[in-house]
Image (cartoon, rainbow, N blue to C red):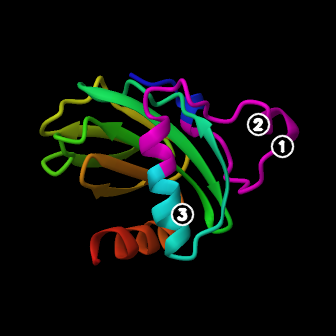
Amino acid sequence: MLPQSILARQPSSECDARELQNLLKPIDPIYSEAMDLAKVLRGYGLTIKCVLPSKMANAFEGQIGAALYRTNRGDFETLFLKKTATFASVKPTEARKNGFYLYSFEGSPSAHGGWTSSKREYFVKHRSQMLITREEELAVYLDKELNSH
């Protein structure tokens, strides 16, 4: 199970000095995929302020990594599988308890537990990637741009 603090960040859409020194590096296993996604999103008019390592790198079986994107429309995490795999059959389940959102997942690949969030999470599946944000408008935008072309 992922610690609650992973998703407790408030979306800032700005990269502070510490983050700018901790950008995703070319030695990261998903660097190429993360930069490819950034390029695609820039083509759809999204301004990528920075791409950072994510603490969600091992949320699912077979996952090769994850990245946190800070953009002009908000922040989102992207989980990456090998290009031959997809998140298509993964079904997020949301429950509420004591003012928190509890997330669990069914399907393949299987999740290594679930997580708790103080805010609702939105999930966008795109091929071998799953994007996660707390901003509904951003999720709608990402889904439209990535999955309707």
User: Does the CB distance between marks 1 and 2 fall below 8 Å?
Assistant: yes
**First along the sequence among labels 1 and 3:** 1
Q: Position of residue 60 (x, y in %)?
A: 29, 29
Residue 16 relative to residue 149: left or right: right
Q: Callout 1, which amino acid?
A: Asp
Residue that appears at 35% across and 39% down = 80
CB contact under 8 Å: marks 1 and 3: no
- Mark 1–mark 2 Cα distance, whole angstroms, equals 5 Å
| Mark 2 or 3, closer to the camera | 2
Where does label 3 land, which residue? 135
Look at label 2 and name its amino acid.
Answer: Glu
Question: Which residue is tagged 2?
Answer: 19
Q: Mark 1 points at which residue?
A: 16
| Mark 2 vs 3, N-terminal side | 2
Residue under the point 63% across and 61% down: 74
Few, some or many C-alpha atoms within 10 Å of disc 2 (few <14, some 14-19, many ≥20)?
some
Residues in magenta, as a range: 7-35
145 vs 102, nearest the viewer:
145
Which one is in front, 3 or 30?
A: 30
- Secondary element at image label 2: helix
